[in-house]
Image (cartoon, rainbow, N blue to C red):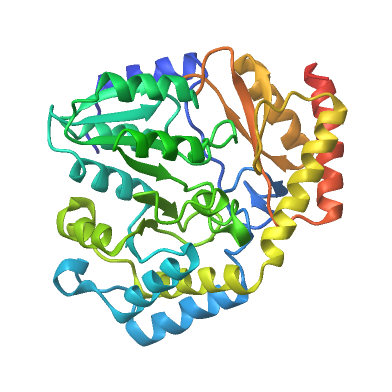
Amino acid sequence: MAREHQWMAERYKELVAGGLNWEPPTLESASEPECTVDGERMIMLSANNYLNLTTHPKVKDAMVKATKKYGAGSGSVRAISGTMDIHLAAEKAVAKFKGVEASLIYSAGYTANVGLIPTLVQGKQDVIISDELNHGSIIDGVRLTKAQRAVYPHNDMSGLEIALKSHSDAERKLIITDGVFSMDGDICPLDEITELAEQHNAMIFVDDCHGEGVLGQGGAGIVDHFGLQGRVDFEIGSFSKALGVQGGIVAGSEQMRTHALNHSRSWLLSGSQPPGVAAAQKAAVEVLMTEPEHHARLWDNTNRFRAEMESLGFDLGHSTTPIIPVMCGESRTAKELVSALRSEGIVAGAIVFPMVARDAARVRNQLSAGLSIAQLDAILSGYELAGRKVGLI
């Protein structure tokens, strides 16, 4: 019998008492707009699969063919003998898609952040200036450095400018921000950030994992959205969200790629992506570049959902993207709303303290290009019934 630790049991009891424990639902089918969750058919509103590419025929076919040709794994880290031609082909496709010189693919968006950030600063002579609502993977990456740290209020450009001026004597200044903020669905003013960075000789690091496939011309991301190619130093992306596969992306200059693959421990010390995954990554990017209708449908569904939810009287916060929260206030209300939605055949996620402030609990909805008109009708009808049941409208 496995050894038990009392402190673990006590810690878990505290989570349960506060309603903060995770009980992940079990997905028993492909991640699609309608799928089987815990044995029941449900409409999915809590997946990152914005473009519904996880089941695209070209993506699946590429994975199957590459697996048959190369096998299930690469047999090594990429720095030694694990770099296959299919990895390089995927990176070239990403660079073309992004309109940049080069890209490097990591095992995940998380490992891109925690692996790259510590290589960009050296010590107390440098400073990292970070938005207060940045993702936890950014926070973890910053914690691995010995640089000075400054945090500016969310999307507050005067606060960013004050931080830059306060650290004007730093040898390296690194501004880090999310592109799309995953809890609120708003975006950073990257154009203003870039202007300030150039005025103060600072580097820019933007995590656009939720902007990939969503923002910009055809979904090229937030740098493209603002037309800033060549002016943003480090653009982090993700294959595991809109692109429907798995893996992290760093895009930028050829110099950036060379630096990252020589210094980033999470890249150097991780086994390379399975060849089937690499082939699927390349295929997903090519689908996005050649089939713009997926991006267009995503925004059609997003705009309709937002307009009709607002007309019902729901508070949708500050979202401007397919991440649309329904603000609930108390954690109890958010959890009651999720439960009521499940009764209507809809899966959405409750976001509660400590992920957000105690009085800022919400149910996060993530729209998909794959949702049909009938499914959107069912979602809106279900939300109206559930919202009235818990007293939100």
Residue 22 or 182: which is nearer the viewer?
182
Q: Residue 103 occupies which quadrant of the picture?
A: bottom left
Indicate the quadrant where residue 379 lies: top right
Question: Which quadrant of the rendered structure holds the N terminus?
Answer: top left
Q: Position of residue 217 (x, y in %)?
A: 61, 59
For residue 370, say whether it is visible. Answer: no
In the displayed structure, does residue 290 sit left or right of residue 189? Answer: right
Residue at (32, 62) in percent of width and height: 104
- Between residues 337 and 14, which one lies in front from this camera angle? 337
Instruction: Give the residue drawn at x 41%, y 15%.
Output: 14
Residue farthest bottom in this picture: 69
Does 291 sit left or right of 200 as displayed? right
Q: Position of residue 53 (x, y in %)?
A: 60, 64
- Closest to the observer, 383 or 297: 297
The front one of 285 and 251 is 251
Left or right: where 93 falls relative to 374: left
Q: Where does residue 16 sit, x and y in percent of width and height?
A: 47, 19
Q: Is residue 285 above or below residue 145?
A: below
Does 135 sit left or right of 87 as displayed?
Answer: right
Residue farthest front in this picture: 199
The answer to whether residue 360 is seen in the rendering is: yes
- Residue appearing at x 27%, y 31% in the figure: 128
